[in-house]
Image (cartoon, rainbow, N blue to C red):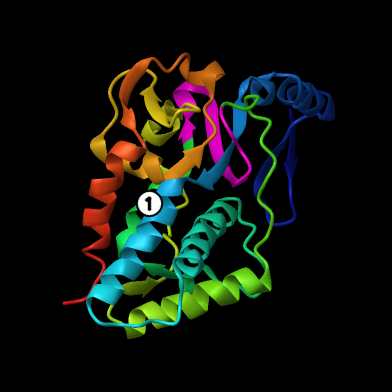
Amino acid sequence: MINNTNNGGNDQTLFDQAVMDLVRARITHSGVASDYRDYSVGTGVTGIVKYASAALVDFLHAKGLNVPVTDSDIETALSTTIQLRCLQISRALPKGVFAGDVPIPDFFRPVVTALGMYEDPSRALVIRPVWNPAISGDLADGKAEGNKATTDEQYSTLVRVARVLKANGVKVTNGLPRSLETTHDDIFRIQETDEGELLVAGIDVSEVAVLVRAMLRLQFLGSVFGAARTRYLSVEDLRPTVEAIVSTAFAL
């Protein structure tokens, strides 16, 4: 160490350059960064979202409302909100799209909110959902490609559908969730088989997580959670529950 006195009369303590180089070398080669596992998890939506969209149109028609949007329009809008959530988590929202302006039907907000980046420092683990609607089954762990920006047409459809739904009594609130993280890994520990069965790895997960996972298709990380063996139910089993959720979509 070298002691100097500056012009103001205050002591300054400087480290010799050789000492600094030694510390820098230890930081660079400590291996901490390489030990931290960072996984990208492909994310999409299941057929339940299409079913929910059709159910919402049926409810609108039952109220005598002939709305100028189809169930396909609503499905696209809901899928786009999940895509934007993935982009928001990656801090990659398209230019001109602001998190606080994104309209989300209230009945679907719990699904969007449940999706976030999960980090567990004790296990040196990070899981990041990325938009990849083409995923099927259990892809190679951490190899997901995705997070493509939404097109202007997709976002315009989302805004138009939200406006029409709101005008016809459906509760819609603007703004993606502010928090980008989730404190639970529940939704990532559920695997969907080719037959649509939901299997859980480890201890039981919450009912909310199962319901959210029924609407989100998430790549399962077997290398992190091991084999998913415990059968909960199938995606199809949750159709009555989803229909009940959609029935609460309307403002009083």
Residue at point 55%, 52% (across, down): 86
Residue at point 39%, 39% (across, down): 213
Which image quadrant for residue 61? bottom left
Residue 5 place in picture, x, y as percent: 73, 45
Q: Can you see residue 235?
A: yes
Quadrant where the image shows the C terminus: bottom left
The residue closer to the viewer here, 129 or 27, is 129
* Magenta region: 119-137
Residue 46 place in picture, x, y as percent: 47, 45
Q: Is residue 124 above or below residue 56?
A: above
Q: Secondary structure at mark 1?
A: helix
Which residue ends up furthest to the bottom in the rendered image? 167
Q: Is residue 59 above or below residue 189?
A: below
In reply to whether residue 131 is colored magenta, the answer given is yes
Q: Amino acid at mark 1?
A: Val
Q: Which residue is mark 1?
A: 111
